[in-house]
Image (cartoon, rainbow, N blue to C red):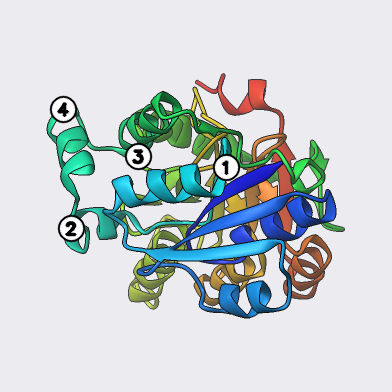
Amino acid sequence: MILGLIAGNGRFPFLILDAARAEGHTVVVAAIREETDPEINIRAASDPGIRVHWLSLGELSRLIDTFRKEGATKAVMAGQVKHKQIFSSIRPDWRLAKLLLNLRTRNTDVLLGAVAKVLGDEGIELINSTAFLEPLLAQEGVLTERAPDDEERKNIEYGLAVARAVAGFDIGQTVVVAAQACVAVEAMEGTDAAIERAGNLMRSMEGEASTLERRLTVVKVAKPNQDMRFDVPVIGVPTVETMIRAHATCLSVEAGHTLLFDRSALLERARQAGIAIVAVPRDVAHNQR
C-alpha cells in the first residue's frame, strides 16, 4: 500500500512512519512547513520507501494533487497543528477558501471533518490516526506505581464531568483541578499551556490564605463523539515535565482513546516525580454528573 501521511509537529508522524514502513508500506509524506520537524528529510534520505513533499498549511489542492500523483488512496493525519495557526498563519488556496466559507463553525471537528470529506471525494480515504499504533493506546487502570489518593480521586471525578462538557463543545480536552475546583480549561493554546497556566495561577496565590489545596490534578478526555481520524488525545514525557513544573501530582486519561508516547520513559519520569497516572474507562469518562 502507498500511504499518505499528513504530518504535523511532534513525534506522532515519526511513529506512524516507523510503523507503516515496518509493515512494508510506502509512505508519501505531506510535510507542513509551519509544523513538521525537518528531521523528516533525513529519514527520507536514508529510506527509498519514504517520499517527502513540503507544502503550506493552506495548500489543500496541492495536497490532493500530491497524493493522487503518488498513488496514495489512503491517508492518515498525525501530529498536532497548533489551532492558532489556522487563524493566523494560514493562507488558503481556492479549494480551502471555498471550504472555509461553507463551514457553519471553525472548530477542529468541523474543519478537519470537511477536509476529510474533500479528500474522500477525490478518492483518498482518511483512516484512523491510531491505525498503526493500537499498542500505544492506554489500557484501563492505574499505570504508575502510585495510585491516586482520595483527594486526587475526588478531583478526577469532578474533572471528568467538566472535561466531558468542555470536550463536547470541541473547546479543549483537558481541565486542571484543585480541591474539586476548576483552575484551568484547555482551549486554543493546548494542553501543556493550560497546565502551565494553572501552575502559575496557584503560585500567584502562595502566601495567601486559601481554601484550595495546592495540589493540581490534570484530567484529559477524548471528545464524546471522538473521531479517531484526528485530534486523538496524546500524552508523553513533555506532559509529565510540564506537570512537574506546575506542581501537578495526578493525571487522568481516557482508556482506549489516549496514545502514550515513550511509555516506559513517561512512566519512569512520573515515578521519579511521585505523579500518579490512571486511565479511566470511556463509560466512566462520559457518564460523570
Q: Which residue is mark 1?
A: 72
Element on which disc 2 rests? loop
Q: Which residue is mark 4?
A: 102
Front-lying residue, 193 or 46: 46
Task: Measure the C-alpha gap from mark 4 to mark 3.
Answer: 15 Å
Give me the residue at 49% from left, 22% from top: 225
Task: Measure the C-alpha gap from mark 3 to mark 1.
Answer: 24 Å
Q: Is residue 268 left or right of residue 154?
A: right
Viewer can see residue 91: yes
Give me the residue at 31% from left, 47% from top: 60
Of the image marks 3 and 1, the number of the one nearer the N terminus: 1
Give me the residue at 18% from left, 37% from top: 100
The label nearer to you, 4 versus 1, is 1
- Give the quadrant of the N terminus: top right
Which label number is shown at residue 186? none
Q: Is residue 186 left or right of residue 85?
A: right
Of the image marks 4 and 3, the number of the one nearer the N terminus: 4
Element on which disc 1 rests? loop
* Vertical order, 48 against 179 (above or below): below
Three-letter code, disc 2: Arg
- Where residue 87 appears, as percent x and y from the top left, is 19, 54
Three-letter code, disc 4: Asn
Front-lying residue, 218 or 7: 7
